Amino acid sequence: MQKLIFFLITFFYFENLLSQEEYFLTLRNEKVNLRQGPSFDYQVKIFYKKKFLPVLIQDSSNNFRKVRDHENNSGWIHISQLSKKKAAIVINDELIMFNGSTIYSNPIALLKRGRLVKIKKCKKNWCKAVSGNFKGWIKKEGLWGLL
């Protein structure tokens, strides 16, 4: 009986930890409201105007998710305004996009801080991305929006 009780306590403890794990989503629309609380009754803090902007999901309450952006603004967004598409923000001053997933391949573009890139797929240290008219590989370490 003690083993069963121990198992149940352990199971619920770890399930609770996993449900609180942070993850990234992106904004679904061009205009998204960041609210002070998890309801339409709360005031709007910020109007986002960038589709696919990555946000870190930190908590949930009914149909709202508590998010944090790359500038450390936090608040609540309705789940209908979020998407599972992958994107990231360049956080280095400059980040080189290459033709292949190695620094020895041809450079394609120089991406500046704050540039939004859509992520197609990722390897260990590299991600295949699209930004404007450029498609190529960039190092993960210079991006915010990926785990």
Image (cartoon, rainbow, N blue to C red):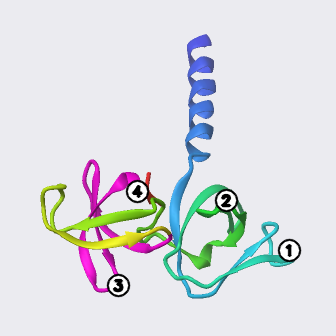
Residue that numbered label 3 is attached to:
132
The residue carrying pointer 1 sits among few (fewer than 14), some (14 to 19) or many (20 or more) residues within 10 Å by Cα, namely few
Q: Give me the C-alpha separation between circle 1 and circle 2.
A: 20 Å
Q: Give me the C-alpha separation between circle 3 and circle 4.
A: 18 Å
The residue carrying pointer 3 sits among few (fewer than 14), some (14 to 19) or many (20 or more) residues within 10 Å by Cα, namely few
Q: Position of residue 126 (x, y in %)?
A: 27, 55
Q: Is 61 displayed left or right of 13 in the figure? A: right
Question: What amino acid is labelled 1 in the image?
Answer: Tyr
Give the numbered dot on residue 72: 2
Q: Position of residue 98 (x, y in %)?
A: 21, 66
Could you tell which of marks 3 and 1 lies nearer the N-terminus? Answer: 1
**Rendered residue at 45%/73% (across/down):** 115
Q: From the viewer's perspective, is the residue at label 4 or at label 2 nearer?
A: 4
- The answer to whether marks 3 and 4 mark residues whose Cβ atoms lie closer than 8 Å is no
Q: Give me the C-alpha separation between circle 4 and circle 2.
A: 17 Å
Question: In front: 22, or 117?
Answer: 117
Residue 120 lies in the magenta stretch: yes
- Decide: is 1 above or below 13: above
**Secondary structure under badge 3?**
loop
Q: Position of residue 79 (x, y in %)?
A: 62, 72
Residue that numbered label 1 is attached to:
42
Q: From the viewer's perspective, is the residue at label 1 or at label 2 nearer?
A: 2
Could you tell which of marks 1 and 2 lies nearer the N-terminus? Answer: 1
Question: In front: 100, or 32?
Answer: 100
The residue most toward the left is 105
**Rendered residue at 45%/59% (across/down):** 92
